Image: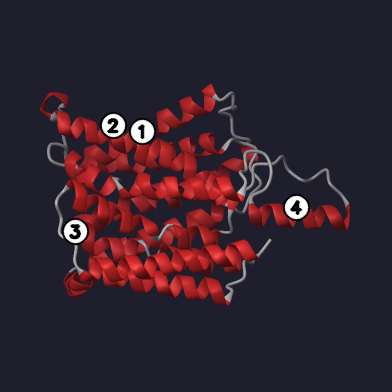
């Protein structure tokens, strides 16, 4: 994703090469250096990883769809307010709305709705291995839509990461055949997230990434709100426990606002394939955070998964540092 003004006024072969490079690396207004990008990537791991136990705490007194609606709507407001406080314009150029809506439908709407149904039908543990196949789909879409090369190092990192995810919940894979609808919906959420990540990089954006994240969440709120209304779920603030309120606050401010603030800059800093592989660390952080906060037991599968995914991240990092 690139936040520089459009390159329509540039001319010549040199300008064309600069424009192509900017589209693939995310250089320009609002972009960050690779060093800052790595810091923001780790920030995203922590924000989303700790959302696993936070969600468990929130759902003790709030139903799934009410929780999802509150978190996404409030997260959108926080991001747009933050963008305005930074002095960024909230207005999106008319020519950008089509790409923004397509990316938002993939990143926020399809992903959120299908993942929520998938978790409901499969449970969070069984769904997570499918959700985090996202890097595989992002790599495929990036190859065809952005022309990103699938180097040997990236393929190796992708393979190591996927093996780590399988090892993470190997004991649950036998249950997937008992819930084909849940598995299909969760797979669709992973494909949508991969496509949304790549689609965001297709355009040179004029807006601050914070504002883009806020508007994408706004688009995602619409189908979630519709399902919430049709589900007959009710929301009574007085019935929500203090523990759940604190968990919701974390999900709004950290797992949504801060995470998307960081994630959209990560998308700008790195190729889509690299970004996707980097996201594989999230379920590892989630497992470790759940073990700490929810007293969930860690075993040899978690150790093997941690080793494989760290190897994938290291391979990905070395490959990225060697290339301009």
Q: Nearer the viewer, residue 246 or 321?
A: 321
Q: Nearer the viewer, residue 195 or 136?
A: 136
Contact (Cβ within 8 Å) of mark 2 with mark 1: yes
Report helix, strand or loop for mark 4.
Answer: helix
Is the residue marked by circle 2 packed among few (<14), some (14-19), or many (20+) residues within 10 Å? some
Q: CA distance from mark 3 to mark 2?
A: 23 Å
Q: Residue at x 37, y 53 (%)?
A: 111
- Which residue matches tag 1? 253
Report helix, strand or loop for mark 2.
Answer: helix
User: Which callout, 3 or 2, points to the residue nearer the camera?
Assistant: 2
Q: Position of residue 289 (x, y in %)?
A: 25, 50
Is tag 1's residue or tag 3's residue first in the polypeptide sequence? 3
Q: Residue at x 56, y 25 (%)?
A: 86
Relative horizontal placement of residue 59, taking residue 127 as reference (left or right): left
Contact (Cβ within 8 Å) of mark 4 with mark 2: no
- Which residue matches tag 3? 123
- In the picture, the disc for residue 249 is 2
- In the picture, the disc for residue 19 is 4
Q: Image quadrant of residue 161?
A: bottom left
Relative horizontal placement of residue 231, taking residue 145 as reference (left or right): left
Is the residue marked by circle 1 packed among few (<14), some (14-19), or many (20+) residues within 10 Å? some
Q: Residue at x 70, y 52 (%)?
A: 22
Give the vertical position of 129 relative to 224 (above or below): below
Is tag 3's residue or tag 2's residue first in the polypeptide sequence? 3
Q: Is residue 273 visible?
A: no
Q: Nearer the viewer, residue 169 or 17?
A: 169
Report helix, strand or loop for mark 3.
Answer: loop
Is the residue marked by circle 4 packed among few (<14), some (14-19), or many (20+) residues within 10 Å? some
Give the vertical position of 130 relative to 231 (above or below): below
Q: CA distance from mark 1 to mark 4?
A: 35 Å
């Amino acid at each position: 994703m690139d936040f520089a003004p459009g390159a329509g006024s540039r001319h010549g072969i040199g300008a064309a090469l600069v424009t192509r490079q900017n589209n693939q690396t995310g250089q320009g207004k609002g972009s960050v250096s690779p060093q800052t990008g790595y810091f923001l990537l780790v920030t995203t791991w922590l924000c989303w990883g700790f959302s696993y136990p936070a969600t468990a705490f929130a759902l003790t007194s709030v139903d799934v769809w009410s929780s999802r609606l509150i978190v996404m709507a409030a997260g959108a407001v926080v991001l747009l307010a933050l963008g305005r406080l930074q002095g960024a314009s909230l207005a999106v150029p008319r020519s950008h709305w089509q790409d923004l809506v397509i990316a938002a439908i993939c990143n926020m709407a399809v992903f959120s709705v299908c993942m929520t149904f998938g978790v409901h039908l499969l449970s969070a543990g069984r769904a997570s291995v499918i959700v985090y196949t996202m890097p595989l789909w992002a790599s495929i879409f990036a190859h065809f839509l952005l022309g990103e090369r699938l180097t040997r190092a990236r393929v190796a990192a992708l393979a190591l990461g996927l093996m780590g995810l399988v090892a993470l919940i190997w004991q649950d894979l036998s249950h997937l055949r008992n819930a084909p609808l849940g598995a299909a919906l969760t797979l669709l959420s992973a494909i949508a997230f991969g496509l949304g990540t790549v689609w965001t990089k297709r355009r040179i954006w004029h807006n601050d990434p914070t504002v883009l994240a806020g508007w994408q969440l706004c688009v995602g709120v619409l189908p979630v709100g519709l399902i919430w209304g049709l589900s007959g779920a009710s929301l009574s603030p007085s019935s929500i426990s203090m523990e759940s309120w604190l968990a919701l606050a974390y999900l709004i401010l950290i797992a949504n606002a801060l995470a998307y603030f960081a994630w959209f800059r990560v998308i700008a800093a790195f190729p889509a394939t690299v970004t996707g592989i980097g996201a594989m660390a999230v379920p590892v952080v989630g497992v470790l955070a759940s073990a700490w906060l929810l007293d969930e037991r860690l075993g040899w599968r978690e150790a093997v998964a941690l080793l494989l995914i760290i190897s994938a991240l290291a391979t990905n990092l070395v490959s990225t540092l060697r290339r301009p």
